Amino acid sequence: MFLLTPVLVAVVCILMVWIFKNADGATKRREEEPRARAEARPWVDEDLKDSTDVLQVEEDADEWQESEEEVEHVPFSHTRYPEKEMVRRSQEFYELLNKRRSVRFISNERVPMEVIDNVIKAAGTAPSGAHTEPWTFVVVKDPDVKHRIREIIEEEEEINYLKRMGPRWVTDLKKLRTNWIKEYLDTAPVLILIFKQVHGFAANGKKKIHYYNEISVSIACGILLAALQNAGLVTVTTTPLNCGPRLRVLLNRPANEKLLMLLPVGYPSKEATVPDLPRKPLDQIMVTV
Amino acid sequence: MFLLTPVLVAVVCILMVWIFKNADGATKRREEEPRARAEARPWVDEDLKDSTDVLQVEEDADEWQESEEEVEHVPFSHTRYPEKEMVRRSQEFYELLNKRRSVRFISNERVPMEVIDNVIKAAGTAPSGAHTEPWTFVVVKDPDVKHRIREIIEEEEEINYLKRMGPRWVTDLKKLRTNWIKEYLDTAPVLILIFKQVHGFAANGKKKIHYYNEISVSIACGILLAALQNAGLVTVTTTPLNCGPRLRVLLNRPANEKLLMLLPVGYPSKEATVPDLPRKPLDQIMVTV
């Protein structure tokens, strides 16, 4: 009896501490859950993320700069303008681009396909990490495919808005409705869906990392926007939230391609309006050292 | 004595279990460390990552589209060209940009600063998420600052190369040396360092998320590259690995700005060469549906 008591007390104590510590751990896990849920936010398009980081392994790092080491170097031929002409050309280019606006009201009038070819050829001159040219421009003219794209995007956008608004959605529904109705996806004669190739394939079939693929493809998009403006066409830069995987499957693109942007392209409709937004002046975006 | 024994045993047991559980936790922490170290890979520039995701919280999501809802809408004025002229303009723009190459041999000849102003003004016409215009272009002309930038970049690049090469570095050193020597950082009359503002500040001083800031700034860079080419200047798109924080401090940029790209700008030097790389033809980058 006197021998049993200390043993019994010991066992009870061990059990108590064990249970207490485990309960503590469970509490910690529960505390972590909301954070994990918060991280899988509906407002961040998982398919949009640059997978360079995720896939990157040290073995592949050599490919980053070496692609250029193995090819022959040739003299660079350059067109140089007199200083006055440089100033004039740069001024005119700025004035042309400064007229560009994101236009959401697009006429259904057809556009010359030769122009679409040329603007995409221009976009394809962009630089890219290790000259991987990790872009695919899908030009959609087929009205049925355009409409299917619209359905997918409006479905996902509606979910985004309703989830996002939470309890406020009932009262705000009317105001928001215009936000997920994308008429231009039907009316624009051309939709350009821009996919980034997060990796390619080496000759031996192994995955070949595309370094800086998202930055490269975004640069190509910048050139595409300039080319469209130069040709007298309008567009709006959209990043359809959470629609990437469904649109990729609809358009039969392979799994290494992720949707980065969608540009509806055409002429502005007659009643097109734009928000009266100013641009920052030069001294707010440039610092000289 | 018989009363004390159980108490003593209990205390000893509690202490033992406590120590054991804590040691267990410490082991777990140690196991996690190498993973954390592996994640901080030397080949991924931590400062380059888009912090949108990290900072994003649901409360801020409303700001994404609403900025445009509160401003007045005005009629959009458009310049439309006849079809033939559209084709010609788009063809000429493509041909102009197709002559662009990444040039690493830059002459020390000065360039007209009015042209630099104009190309940055052009870049500033890029669209951006919620019209945040999340870019800062730092134009460096000061030879001492340029040289300090070169020192920082060459130091970091050397570390990158040596780390990367591991045991192979001794034999390959000579071949690689050219890779981390960046003479153009001294010779180019102008360096443009492009920072992305990962967040801004609302009127109440709270952080204001800049959605899609990296994509937006990359689009602006694409327009900047087109503008430089149009003006007859050359550059090379560089993303100095791991140099962002030091260059940011050197240039007195605030913590919400992260270096995205560095462009040395000028005329090509007389002996400039470029690798003889072809571009993908249109049918390899465009798909029509």
Image: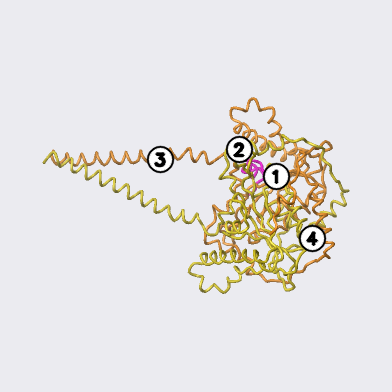
Chain colours: A yellow, B orange
Amino acid residing under circle 2: Asp
Task: Residue A256: give x, y in percent of width and height.
Answer: 60, 49
How far is mark 4 from mark 1, CA to CA? 29 Å
Task: Residue B94: give x, y in percent of width and height.
Answer: 79, 53
How far is mark 4 from mark 3, CA to CA? 61 Å
Disc 1 versus disc 3: nearer the observer: 3
Amino acid residing under circle 1: Leu
- Which residue bears the numbered disc 2? A60
Determine the chain carrying the residue at label 4. Answer: A
Amino acid residing under circle 4: Ala
> Which is nearer the N-term, disc 4 or disc 2?
2
Q: Nearer the viewer, residue B200 or B275?
A: B275
How far is mark 1 from mark 3, CA to CA? 42 Å
- Which residue bears the numbered disc 4? A231
Task: Residue B140: give x, y in percent of width and height.
Answer: 73, 45
- Which residue bears the numbered disc 3? B28
Q: Is residue A263 visible?
A: yes
- Which residue bears the numbered disc 1? B262
Q: Magenta region: which residues? A: B237-253
Amino acid residing under circle 3: Lys
